[in-house]
Image (cartoon, rainbow, N blue to C red):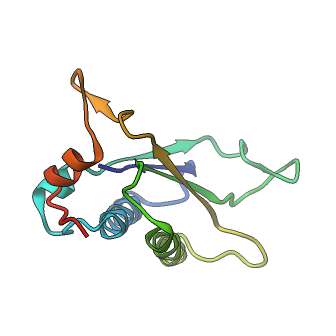
Amino acid sequence: MPLIQVNAPEGVLTSQSQDVLMARLSNAVLKAEGAPIEDPAAQSLVWAHYIEHPKGTTYVGGEAIDKPPLRIAVTTPEGALNDETRKTLVEDIGAIVDDVYGPFEGRLNHWAMLYEVMEGGWAGGGQIFPLAGIQAAMNIKAA
């Protein structure tokens, strides 16, 4: 049950490129969590937001830049990822961003930030969703 948020400068990606980016990121997170990518139940629990901010509002080293990096935040329930799957996910995110947004010469084209919500802290509809329940809903087989 990941939440993906991509912050990007206004207009740097076409609508089609946004769709590709978000679909590929969603699948990468599902893969990292051990969910079957083709499973509709797993797909239905990947929520993602593409958030644009106005041009000229991103600064690097105190100066506004023309082609700012993307910020990709992935939030998962505590225990959904381990050191190995985090490393693989970060590598996958890097390859996806390079592919869709393009690499930058001499600097990073994105930050990837991984967050975990503590066990008992993921909730919706007036109920708490423990990791085991989330994994069952996503058809993730226990390792």
Q: In the rendered image of this protein, does residue 114 appear above or below residue 105?
A: above
Q: In the rendered image of this protein, does residue 4 appear above or below residue 109?
A: above
State left or right for residue 136 relative to residue 55: left
Residue found 12% across the figure and 64% down from its top = 39
Residue in front for this viewpoint, 132 or 70: 132
Residue in front for this viewpoint, 106 or 138: 138
Residue found 69% across the figure and 75% down from its top = 104
Residue found 39% across the figure and 64% down from its top = 25
Q: Residue furthest front?
A: 143
Q: How many marks?
A: 0
- In which quadrant is the C terminus drawn? bottom left
State left or right for residue 30 relative to residue 36: right
State left or right for residue 59 relative to residue 89: right
Q: In the rendered image of this protein, does residue 22 appear above or below residue 87?
A: above
Q: In the rendered image of this protein, does residue 107 appear above or below residue 42?
A: below
How far across and down, in percent of the image, does residue 73 sit? Answer: 52, 51
Residue in front for this viewpoint, 130 or 51: 130
Residue in front for this viewpoint, 93 or 116: 116
How far across and down, in percent of the image, does residue 96 sit? Answer: 46, 74
How far across and down, in percent of the image, does residue 58 sit? Answer: 72, 47
Residue found 51% across the figure and 69% down from its top = 83
Q: Residue furthest top?
A: 126
